[in-house]
Every structure is written in C-alpha cells, then in structure tokens.
Amino acid sequence: MKDYAQPDAGGHFGTFGGRYVGETLIAALDELKTAWDSAKNDPAFLAEFHAMLRDYAGRPSPLDYAERLTKKVGGAKIYLKREDCNHTGAHKVNNVVGQGLLARRMGKCNLIAETGAGQHGVATATIAARFGMSCKVFMGAEDVRRQAPNVLRMKMLGAEVVSVTSGTSTLKDAMNEAMRYWSAHCTDTYYVVGTAAGPDPYPEMVRDFQRVIGDEVRTQYAEKEGGLPDLLIACVGGGSNAIGLFYPFIGDASVGLLGAEAGGRGVATGKHAASITGQQLGILHGARTYLLQDPNGQVLEAWSVSAGLDYPGVGPEHAYLAEIGRAKYAAVTDREAIEAFQLICRLEGIIPALESSHAVALALKVAATMRPNQSVVVCLSGRGDKDIDHVNAWLAEHPDAVLA
Ligand SMILES: *Cc1c(COP(=O)(O)O)cnc(C)c1O
C-alpha cells in the first residue's frame, strides 16, 4: 500500500511541501508547529473547535441528494455536500475558526491574511471580529479594484485592507507582502493562511481543520445509503475544500478522488489555473509544488472565470496524491463551469459558487459514465450570490452558452 500518512516530520508530502522561507520565518513556523502539535492532541481545544463549528458556523452542513440533476445525467446518484449553507457561505469558515482559536491559544491578538478574490479576507475579518482581534488583509491593488464588494465587507467587519502595488498587484504579490510583514511582526501577529498550502505546518493544519467535511460525509452517507460513496469530487484552488473532503477516505481504495482544476479558456491557451495539469514544479508560498510559471521561473497570474480559483499553485498534498495516482485531477473550462452553474440553479434551486460549479461540471461528465447503483459526492464549496453579476456579464458575451 502507498504511504498516505503524510506529511513527514519536516512537512514533506513525498518530495512536495517543506519550508522554503527566510531565516526569520523559521522561528515563527517552529512556534506555530509546536502550538499546533499541542492543540491537535488537546481534547479541550478540539471540543471548542467543534462547538464553534456547530454554534457559529452552523455545522453539520447537509448531505443533499440532487434528484433532478441525477435524472438529467442518467448515471450515478449525485449527492451535494452543502458547504454553501455555512455561515459566510463557504467552507472557508472551518479553517478560520480553527486558526482563530489557535491564534488565541498562542496569545496573538493581531491577525493578518492575504487574499485574491477577497473571500479568505472576509473569512479572516469575520473571525477577528468574533474574537476581538485586529485584522490586516493584504490584497493586490488590482484585486482591490476588481473585488469591491468583498473589500467593503472586510471594512464593515472592522478589518484594514492593505493594497499591494508590487509586481502585478495581484494575489502572488499579496502573498509575498503578507510573508514579509509576518517576518517583521511575528511576536504578536498570527498569519492566517487560507488554503491547504504554504510552508509547513500550514498544509497539514488547514487539512485537519477542513477534514470535518469528509468526516461528516462519511457518517451522513452511511446513514442515507449505507457503505461508502464510489467517487468524491471537489474543485481545487489551493485545495482546502478538496483535501477536506478527500482526506478521511484516503485509505479506502474503493473510493475514487477527483479534483476539478480551473481550465479557464482552455489549458492550451495558457489562460488557466490548472497547476497540476500543467506539471510545472517550483517553489511557491514557501513550499515545493506545482505552480503556474513562465519559462524564466516567474510566477504567472492564474486565469479563471472564477476569482476564487486564482491561487497560482496547488497545495503540496494534492501534488503528492496526483504523483502517486491516488487522486486524479482534470481541468474544467470557464464555459463548462458556467453551463453547470445554470443547470444546478434550474434543476435544484441552488445558486452555486462559480468555484463549486467546476466540481459540478466534472460530476455531470463522470456520473454519466457510471451505473445507477453507484454514487458521487460533490463538494458544493460555497454559494454563488457573489457571482451572479459576473455570470450574467459572461453570458451576455457568450449568448450561445445561455441555457434555454
Ligand atoms: C476559496 C474558495 C475555493 C477555493 O479554495 P480551496 O482552498 O481550493 O478550497 C473554492 N470554493 C469556494 C466557494 C471558495 O470560496
């Protein structure tokens, strides 16, 4: 059997992950790792985490049988894990509740984060308000302009949004700036990473906070159908909702794991965010992984109709699962995602996030090739109210994609 007990003591998932950061951050990461190692084995900490997920975030989220979608596809049964029902409308709350509690345990009362689309910034601002902590969110100037509603949300929640103008003024530059700021302020500041990526111990820690998704699916599926689902599908930006769903099933060989990367306008056009599909190895956000880069090793901006899949790399555990073949990954184009978005609106009365629509699109394709006595669980990572103007504008430019 392949070794699924990752990472090793140094935070490596096979040859991926690790810590590629400046010397000042090593001490900060050591302090964090020590605190996390103690917290994750402390029943009181875990009880507080789960109580807050219940009372504040509204967990467990439902496992919902999509009957009309299933009939339309005519293959495997499609279940939706409804992370869109959580407080703040996505899975991101699971992670910020966990890291907020850890920051408090470590005595750090200032939170920082970086954000691209703004959703992780909003989640961090939310938890900072709840805990009475200060919050600074680094965001590329270009993203500040493009994501005005989320900038306003962060401000309403009491956070400061720091507009970053280096490089291309987008997410990768905000990530560099957040790391730089953290190096200088790590005694009183906690850096909340928003996905299962970054230097050790973040990928493992974020996974362990998000695994509540898969743990719940296991119980809920057994109650509804008995046994285990045949296939799990989730979209992959940095990979936190996907690893949260996959991880509890990793040792169950009968359960397939399938990640949907953002194929943008098509991988061949270069306008995409499909890091695993692209197979370019390098260092991003302090870890060795697949990332988007040009021939000179410069990090490229991710491209997708869905702003939340804009992470220019992928978490190291996904890189590892892809390499050993335990999970498969496929690129889904903007058009396929928007077609799936419209379909689930009409057939299930659910407006999904554009990110999640990538997972739904892949599910429609794959479920059609499966038998009616099989089941697919799709992670509906978030709700799509934030995306309706964008979808509307995209459809105005692509009238042939409008669902009749
Ligand atoms: C942020 C976000 C994602 C992508 O992040 P992962 O870390 O890959 O899960 C997906 N869906 C929604 C709704 C998001 O907000």
Image: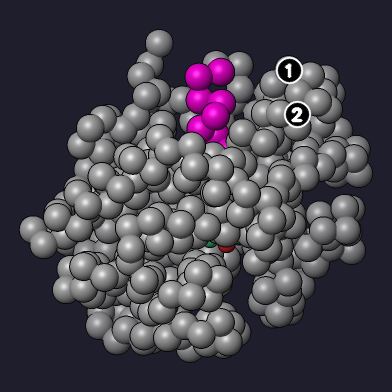
Where is residue 61? Give x, y as percent: 73, 48
Would residue 116 be seen by someone viewing this image from the given angle?
no
Q: Is residue 144 above or below residue 190?
A: below
> Which residue is most to the top?
1
Examine the image and state in which quarter residue 181 appears.
bottom left
Earlier in the chain: of badge 1 and badge 2, it is 2
Residue 159 badge: none
Q: CA distance from mark 1 to mark 2?
A: 7 Å
Image quadrant holding the N terminus, namely top left
Where is residue 383? Give x, y as percent: 71, 62
Where is residue 123? Give x, y as percent: 54, 68
Would residue 109 be seen by someone viewing this image from the given angle?
yes
Drawn side of residue 4 relative to residue 260, left or right: left
Q: Which residue is mark 1?
A: 227
Q: Nearer the viewer, residue 182 or 128?
A: 128
Q: Is residue 247 magenta?
A: yes
Q: The residue under label 2 is which amino acid type?
A: Tyr
Q: Is residue 370 magenta?
A: no
Q: Residue at coordinates 82% horizontally, 42% vertically from top-left?
A: 64
Find numbered disc 2 in the image and state the secondary structure of the residue it sits on: helix
Find numbered disc 1 in the image and state the secondary structure of the residue it sits on: loop
Q: Which residue is mark 2?
A: 221
Q: Residue at coordinates 81% horizontally, 26% vertically from top-left?
A: 223
